[in-house]
Amino acid sequence: MDVSGGRGQPRPGNDESPDRTGTRPPAEPGHPTDERPAAPEEPRPPAAEPDPPVPDAGPDAGREKPPPADTGTGRHLAHSGTGRTPPPQRPQEKQRGGLLMGRPFGVPVYVAPSWFLVAILITWVFGGQIDRVLPELGAVSYLVSLFFAVAFYASVLVHELAHTIAALRFKLPVRRIQLQFFGGVSEIEKEAETPGREFVLAFVGPLLSLVLSGLFYLALLAVDPSSVPGVLLAGLMISNLIVAVFNLLPGLPLDGGRMLRAVVWAISGKPMTGTIAAAWVGRALAVAVLIGLPLLTQSGVLGSDAVDNVGMDTVMDALLAAILAAIIWTGAGNSLRMARLREHLPELRARNLTRRAVPVETDTPLSEALRRANAAGARALVVVDPDGVPLSLVREAAIVGVPEHRRPWVPVGGLAQDITDGMHVPAELAGEDLLDALRATPATEYLVVEDTGEIYGVLSAADVERAFVKAMARPS
């Protein structure tokens, strides 16, 4: 969308419409991730009547959602009504991650509320085992067990820090580390650029867990195995070994699944092919855990005595298997959705989604401004000073809220939002860079400018939202 060359006059030549008076009027537009992607909600289509009521404000400002797509409806500004839609956000991102514990290497570490539930469970189960090995401890055995729970999750944090350090080494931003139910997660915001880096990024976590297991084993050799330190070291050695082996299983969302993805990516040359293969192996793994884990525990293969009857231990084993299977299955599905999101992100280009705009001065009546916009086929208004310098953007939601009979007496300046530095968006911005720019300065509209500083048009966050939804609906 072309508006002016800096002097408040429309600049021709960029629009695809027959009149060719400005930039192309965008159509109705519309992550990942992982890591917990949630399918974005498609915003309601704006009303088409001359004086629609103020539309729904859309998603809450704090809510994280992906962007939208150009639908090419060519609606006139006077009859559009996108409302106060906030800038799009990636679906897997969350505003809060629990209790902040620190910022090692500049990355915030959160403990989710679910961790405390697991800590209680570990304290209860492991405390009973310590009581059988060291009955003389009495109730103190549960205090020792609580220490084990904290030490175990410290080991999980070291595992996640290995992923984080590798990501930072490859210049990949890490949003946060979160310790939660059944482990932790490092939220890395971008993909590795090569399959080799992806493999290293995934492998360092299990590798460090294996190293920790070995260190605890060496420490165990120096103490009495039947003492409190001996029991703690044995428990930490075994638990870290289990973490390493479990994470090496070749299915997403586990580290082994990411390693498999890297291998398939290297062979096929397509990261999406690697994701699909590793995700389906992850789903098969979820089914295997659901069925196989209870059978293995009941048969005694995992070290417990074989049982023929169904008791509380069997029920607990089945429940644990179901929870693990659900986590793996859901994570595999989320990995597929995030891969699709990242595959379609490059389709979101500020230039393609920009609305044509016309420049108007602050005291211009709204009715006159809309007449000029409709005559030019534009869908946005930019308030400029007498020298043509953009000052503010007229909010579409505010226009819709003014009854038609009052528009001749309402100046556009009273309906506009001042343009801040963050509301200047380069026309060539696209993909994740575009989303990062919109998230950095939440607003409903942005001024799109050329590299020369000339106004190209106005980008609506609602248009980005719809473009994203439309792109995600297309098959990969």
Image: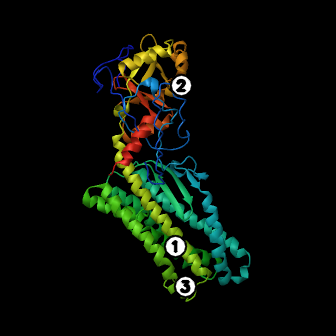
Q: Amino acid at mark 1?
A: Ala
Q: Looking at the picture, how far across and down is residue 205, in whole percent?
A: 45, 63
Give the x, y percent position of residue 73.
37, 32
**Residue at screen point 70% across, 71% down:** 143
Residue receiving disc 2: 398
Q: Position of residue 360 (x, y in %)?
A: 44, 15
The answer to whether residue 428 is visible is: no
Q: Secondary structure at mark 3?
A: loop
Name the residue rendered at 44%, 49% in the picture.
189
Q: Nearer the viewer, mark 3 or mark 1?
A: 1
Q: Viewed as shown, does residue 225 lie left or right of 458?
A: right
Q: Is residue 332 above or below residue 305?
A: above
Answer with the quarter of the image where residue 61 lies. Answer: top right
Confirm or deny contact between disc 3 and disc 1 (CB under 8 A).
no
Q: Which residue is mark 1?
A: 321
| Label number found at residue 42 | none
Farthest front residue in view: 49
Helix, strand or loop at label 1? It is helix
- Residue at x 45%, y 54% (from the top left corner): 34
* Mark 3 or mark 1, earlier in chain: 3
Label number found at residue 304: 3
